[in-house]
Amino acid sequence: MIYQRVALIGLGLIASSMAHAIRRGGLAGEIIGTARSAETREIAREIGLCDRVVDTATEAVQGADLVVLCVPVGAMGGVAEEIAPHLSKGCTITDVGSVKKAVIDAVAPHLPENVHFIPGHPLAGTEHSGPRSGFAELFDNRWNILVPTPGTPPEATEKLRKLWEGMGANVEEMDPEHHDLVLAVTSHCPHLIAYTMVGVADDLRRVTDSEVIKYSAAGFRDFTRIAASDPTMWRDVFLNNKEATLEILGRFTEELFALQRAIRTGDGEQLFDYFTHTRAIRRGIIEAGQDTDAPDFGRGAKR
Amino acid sequence: MIYQRVALIGLGLIASSMAHAIRRGGLAGEIIGTARSAETREIAREIGLCDRVVDTATEAVQGADLVVLCVPVGAMGGVAEEIAPHLSKGCTITDVGSVKKAVIDAVAPHLPENVHFIPGHPLAGTEHSGPRSGFAELFDNRWNILVPTPGTPPEATEKLRKLWEGMGANVEEMDPEHHDLVLAVTSHCPHLIAYTMVGVADDLRRVTDSEVIKYSAAGFRDFTRIAASDPTMWRDVFLNNKEATLEILGRFTEELFALQRAIRTGDGEQLFDYFTHTRAIRRGIIEAGQDTDAPDFGRGAKR
């Protein structure tokens, strides 16, 4: 047991997976959960997600030695303001938001000096949302990036690291600016691009939606998985990681224009070279255990 | 048994999967295979992929009542020219290329009048290539688009349709221009975009390749699967479906700029609306049986 009482604020995919993973590892004495929506709380009670589900964040944090903010990035500041006066002295507060600089700016000013704020970001997720979507294995062999704020005692960070390792994750520390840039590349821009491509397909007059759906196995469907992620979460990501996202998108369109030009001028060599060097990254990802080598990710594999 | 003797020219992922699927269904009396590379032919012999593996395309088509061109789109014309004098009278010749207009332009002029040219495109694939990558289930519940050339007798098309259905596929007919546009949307542009994003990530100075690899589970890895496909094949696709690809890329960059602008100006409503309407297509794809609803495509799912 690492923490006595863990309070999960928000009960979506990440929080519900944390509840399962914490139980699997016997990592907390008690898990308290809350969510803004009465329906979400009702489902969480029905499926026995937490030891107790309470109606307000204020109530949830009472006596908790770990508070985890699992709400959309845009809601973090408001929740922090609400719970701040009720936090136990010496408790740790963390979050699971996909951007870090904006979360720190929104949350830190509200917090009392006698708590430890250690922002975090578990790089794990699926295209599903809500309290029923969680499962204990979500974090297994995935990375959680911790971004301790200045002045945080190392032992508080160490304890949080142990919790995440107990849930199956690997833990890395990073400063918030670098986190936001790395994530713009590995997550935010890919999502925006996937959303855009799906939007274009949906919008064409000369190709029907039913054709797009029927023939999606030719590549398109891989984009639709990430373009089906939670819209509120992603809106908040882009509004709160503007700078890094726009920088990477600028690079992306520059490269895309170069390839478009190669297509227009029939420069097969440039295309071939480009398509060859991108294969190495795929191999690296598989070797690092971050994806499966089974064809089509193993979906429907009957081999 | 639908054909007496099927000749597979080229022995990559599609041809090797056809060999397995034809055997599974007992659809041909004999399967003859050939490939340009001696190494590929050697592997095919070693794993017993075909009934016979021969050294040249000319030899392979002798006495075949079905010839399937499974070479890169850019090589189709040359192969057609080579085999044309050796085709049996009344045989059917088809292909599996990802573009159709350019293949017809390259192949049709070489063919004698007494054969039936019925171009085709099975919309199935994985990120793996070569004679060892094939498996019998590749076409199950996937679409094969047939593009019969003018004057093809309906019974020849019907017979080829039966072969594909016997291999597990659904069959649709389409004209070549529409095929190329539909595929630009569902396949060619998604691939180019994925290649571009992977290229950008690979090229950044401030984010290392090892960081990209480590943190790829946050979305990026879905792009790397399709960006690991065969470079020769994809070079040929873009060189041979220039018009439709550039049209769709034009639409894509237009939309991407609109979303970039929404990020820059902080227009959360526009982002949210965009991200919401793209979810419907995902649902359609899952309902149509073209993808799995399991989280992460079911990869590593231990639930």
Image (cartoon, coloured by chain):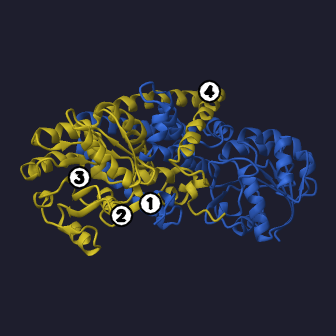
Chain colours: A blue, B yellow
Q: Which mark is residue B68?
A: 3
Crowd rating for badge 3 (residues with CA inside 10 Å; few <14, some 14–19, many 20+): many
Q: Amino acid at mark 3?
A: Val
Query: Are both tags, 2 and 1, on one chain?
Result: no
Give how far apart the Cα atoms at labels 4 and 1 are: 36 Å
State left or right for residue B109 relative to residue B236: left
Is label 3 in a helix, a strand or a loop?
strand
Residue lying furthest bottom in this view?
Answer: B46
Marks 4 and 1: which is nearer the front? 1
Give how far apart the Cα atoms at labels 4 and 2 are: 43 Å
* Chain at tag 3: B
The residue pinned by badge 4 equals B270
Give how far apart the Cα atoms at labels 2 and 1 are: 9 Å
B60 or A192, nearer to the observer: B60
* Chain at tag 4: B
Q: Earlier in the sequence, mark 2 or mark 3?
A: 3
A213 or B75, nearer to the observer: A213
The residue pinned by badge 1 equals A295
Query: Are both tags, 2 and 3, on one chain?
Result: yes
Whether the residues at callouts 2 and 1 have beta carbons within 8 Å, the answer is yes
* Chain at tag 1: A
Residue B9 in sight here: no
Residue lying furthest left in this view?
Answer: B85
Q: Amino acid at mark 4?
A: Gln
The residue pinned by badge 2 equals B133
